[in-house]
Image (cartoon, grey):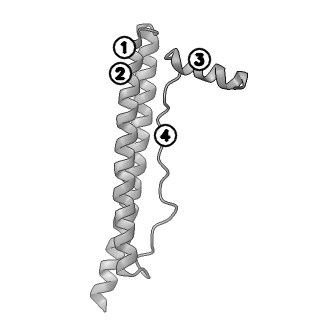
């Protein structure tokens, strides 16, 4: 084993290394309700729901990470307050992003339904 590998193993074993919460990637695009097929809209709805679930899992990970930091006793009250504020900002940003995606999807769904009624 290389020295780097040994150092990483030692760091992980010491409890200092933590699994980082990975921010989920939002879908690249949503279908255009003016031209999309039913199947495309249904698939997009599933993607939006999955992204919402992924954001919920991300926020749960942030919560667990904060609990772990609090229990570690490694930080004073001031630093914990800062970390809680940072965690709240991450959580709020994630919720805002999924809400914005849902809003965009719902707008395209309204366009799709209006177009469908005209046919």
Q: CA distance from mark 2 to mark 1?
A: 6 Å
Specify whether 80 is left or right of 1.
Answer: left
Q: Residue furthest left?
A: 117
Q: Residue furthest front?
A: 1
Badge 1 crowding class, 10 Å Cα cut-off, few under 14, some 14 to 19, many 20 or more, is few
SS type, badge 3:
helix
Q: CA distance from mark 3 to mark 2?
A: 23 Å
Which residue is denoted by mark 1 in the rendering? 71
SS type, badge 2:
helix
Residue 70 pos. (x, y %):
38, 15
Q: Residue at x 50, y 65 (%)?
A: 29
Which residue is denoted by mark 4 in the rendering? 22
Closest to the observer, 14 or 69: 14
Q: Are the residues at dot 2 and dot 1 in contact (C-beta closer than 8 Å)?
A: yes
- Disc on res. 10: 3
Q: Does residue 80 lie above or below 31 as drawn?
A: above
Badge 2 crowding class, 10 Å Cα cut-off, few under 14, some 14 to 19, many 20 or more, is few
SS type, badge 4:
loop
Is any atom of residue 63 visible in this view?
A: yes
Residue 34 pos. (x, y %):
42, 80
Q: CA distance from mark 4 to mark 2?
A: 17 Å
Q: Residue at x 39, y 45 (%)?
A: 55
């Amino acid at each position: 084993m290389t020295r780097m590998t040994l150092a990483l193993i030692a760091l992980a074993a010491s409890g200092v290394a933590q699994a980082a919460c990975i921010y989920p990637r939002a879908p690249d695009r949503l279908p255009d309700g003016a031209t999309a097929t039913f199947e495309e809209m249904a698939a997009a709805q599933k993607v939006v729901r999955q992204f919402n679930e992924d954001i919920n899992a991300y926020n749960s990970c942030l919560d667990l990470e904060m609990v772990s930091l609090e229990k570690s006793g490694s930080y004073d009250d001031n630093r914990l307050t800062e970390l809680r504020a940072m965690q709240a900002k991450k959580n709020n940003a994630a919720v805002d992003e999924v809400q914005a995606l849902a809003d965009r999807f719902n707008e395209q769904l309204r366009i799709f339904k209006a177009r469908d009624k005209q046919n």
